[in-house]
Amino acid sequence: MSTQILNKIVTSRTGYDALALRLPLGIILAAHGAQKLFGWFGGYGLEGTGQWMASIGLEPGFLMALLAGSAEFFGGIALLLGLLTRPAALVAAFTMVVAILSVHWENGLFMSNNGYEFALSLLAASVALTLRGGGSLALDNQLHRVH
């Protein structure tokens, strides 16, 4: 039974199209997660991100920063590799919904006003990968062959 579930999660009938989504999405998510977790790329790290999250009502802030940063960083790496693509993309989609509703929604659509257009784009790519899988060049295919 668990082998059947794993096979459904990792099986992808798509070609190279998923790679065109996985690579940029993985890079963007991993970089944003690194900002939150490690303070890389001009980020504030867990402490600063946690304080900011608490200030906007996402409590406890440190835990929320850890969860969001981990989802983005580790999920982004998983997407780059095409490893457990569907679960990683689903977690990324959920993270983007939270970002849209808690941070960007009230600012409208456009990024110039800190709106939700960029997060919406990431959400769309994440949903597409959740539905389609990692594609031909994903490590998921190796997991499928093992079982």
Image: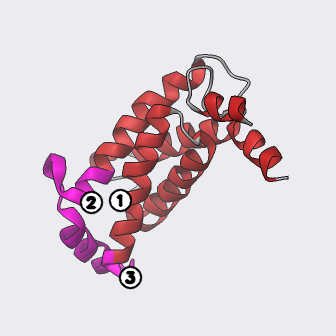
64 and 104: which one is in front? 64
Which disc number belongs to residue 59?
A: 3
Relative to 89, 71 lies left or right: left
Mark 1 to mark 3 CA distance (whole Å): 15 Å
Nearer-N-terminus badge (1/2): 2
Residue under circle 2?
37
Q: Are marks 2 and 3 in contact (CB under 8 Å)?
A: no
Nearer-N-terminus badge (2/3): 2
Magenta residues, dominant SS class: helix
Q: Nearer the viewer, mark 1 or mark 3?
A: 1
Q: What amino acid does circle 1 point to?
A: Gly
Mark 2 to mark 3 CA distance (whole Å): 17 Å
Q: Are marks 1 and 2 in contact (CB under 8 Å)?
A: yes
Residue under circle 1?
69
Mark 1 to mark 2 CA distance (whole Å): 5 Å
Nearer-N-terminus badge (1/3): 3
Callout 3 crowding tier (Cα within 10 Å): few <14, some 14–19, many ≥20: some
Residue depicted at 28% across the width and 79% down the height? 55
Callout 1 crowding tier (Cα within 10 Å): few <14, some 14–19, many ≥20: many
The quarter of the picture where the C terminus appears is: top right
99 and 95: which one is in front? 95
* Residue 109 seen: no
